[in-house]
Amino acid sequence: MLMVMLATMALSIGLTAIVRLVAWRWRIVDRPDTKRKFHKGRVPLWGGLAVYLAMVLGLLLALRHPQLASQPLRDLAAALIPAAGLACLFGALDDLWCFKSRRKLTLQFLSVLPLVAAGYSIDQIVVFGYPITLGWLGVPLTIVWLLGCINALNLIDGMDGLASMVGLSTAAMMGIIAVSMGNNHVAVIAIALAGALAGFLFYNFPPASIFLGDSGSTVIGLVVGILGIQGAMKTSATLSITTPAVIMTLPMFDVVMAVVRRKLTGRRFDAADAEHIHHVLLKRGLHPWQVLGIIAALCLTTGAAATAATVFRKDALAWITAVTLVVLMIRLRLFGYYEFTLLKGALARLAARVLGDRVGGPSLREENELLTQADDEDLVTAGNVVKVPARKDHRKAA
């Protein structure tokens, strides 16, 4: 497997240089703005094409290796390569024409169909040792999971090297888990993706000379999603839900907070903003390398917890770790405190309407004042005082 990773990394380094040159000549670039894109100057897109091609070539190399080639690997690769190819193609077109959210979601749905049509869906899940048969719900839940992973990686791809690093750490952990579960064919795919992302990171670390674009984030999300399902399979169609859910804690938490934030501030779900976890950490004055390190460490922590839970068969260990990290992020106001306060106020107002009386919880005006006061506080962390800039409130008065 080491040979596959090194070969894929080398291929990714070479292919990324070629794709970057092509993107420059065809003017397929991302331009900075004053809202969410703070990079300096134009940066080529379509880095995902290099990642996809390197991963595919790495898989083809593995299929020619007598010790790695197996029928399960052939079957999974036969379904994954066209599915990821569609995701890459649609993402590349989105980089060009900036599709609206409904069209983008439709194309993502079409991308996952080859995997589901090939039979890669969940029939049964295991939660804390208790099996739950899904029946016909298995297919739609599989589709929802894959779409969730695609969009989680897409949303977190807002800073140099971030989506690549998250994808790399997640793929590596899923590869280890796959080996421990005896799913070596899944580990080969995880290693191929990890190698492709490792090579791409030579160009994508801050300051990036090429971006993944949607052509890359959708491919990473799709592959990570199917790795999470197949790598943790106890039998051919029985999934231990702990492993993929805990490994994807941070990206999924970012998605949930985005939905809460946009819903409770009166914006559309697909309305872009600069309030994702990396944006919040950057606003605290952290350097991009520091933000990258923090998020990578969090992903590795949840990945290590999921791995330990799988090896020692202690699901509670993984869930306790994931919940603790989320609570600490909110409690320390690293990320999620703003959304938590919005949610708490919304629930209080809902309770007041249901009970016909004013139940605890601040009014909208009081809540705005509390949020402003909280955001303007000095945050003391490890003996250093960090000024937290006030966050702009997007809500409109009723």
Image (cartoon, rainbow, N blue to C red):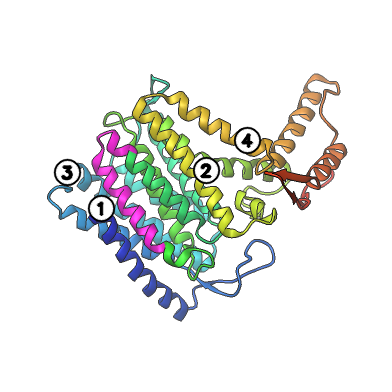
Above or below, 51 relative to 380: below
Give the spatial CA distance, label 2 vs label 1: 25 Å
Closest to the camera, between mark 1 and mark 3, is 1
Secondary structure under the numbered disc 4 in the rendered image: helix
Residue matched to label 1 = 2
Residue matched to label 3 = 71
Range of magenta residues:
177-200
Mark 4 and mark 3 residues within 8 Å of each other at the beta carbon: no
The mark found on residue 328 in the picture is 4
Q: For the residue marked with disc 4, what is the amino acid?
A: Leu
Give the spatial CA distance, label 2 vs label 4: 11 Å
Where is residue 100? Give x, y as percent. Answer: 56, 58
Mark 3 and mark 2 residues within 8 Å of each other at the beta carbon: no
Residue under the point 42% across and 34% down:
306
Secondary structure under the numbered disc 1 in the rendered image: helix
Q: Earlier in the sequence, mark 2 or mark 1?
A: 1
Residue under the point 53% across and 72% down:
43
As rendered, which of 277 and 127 lies closer to the eye?
277
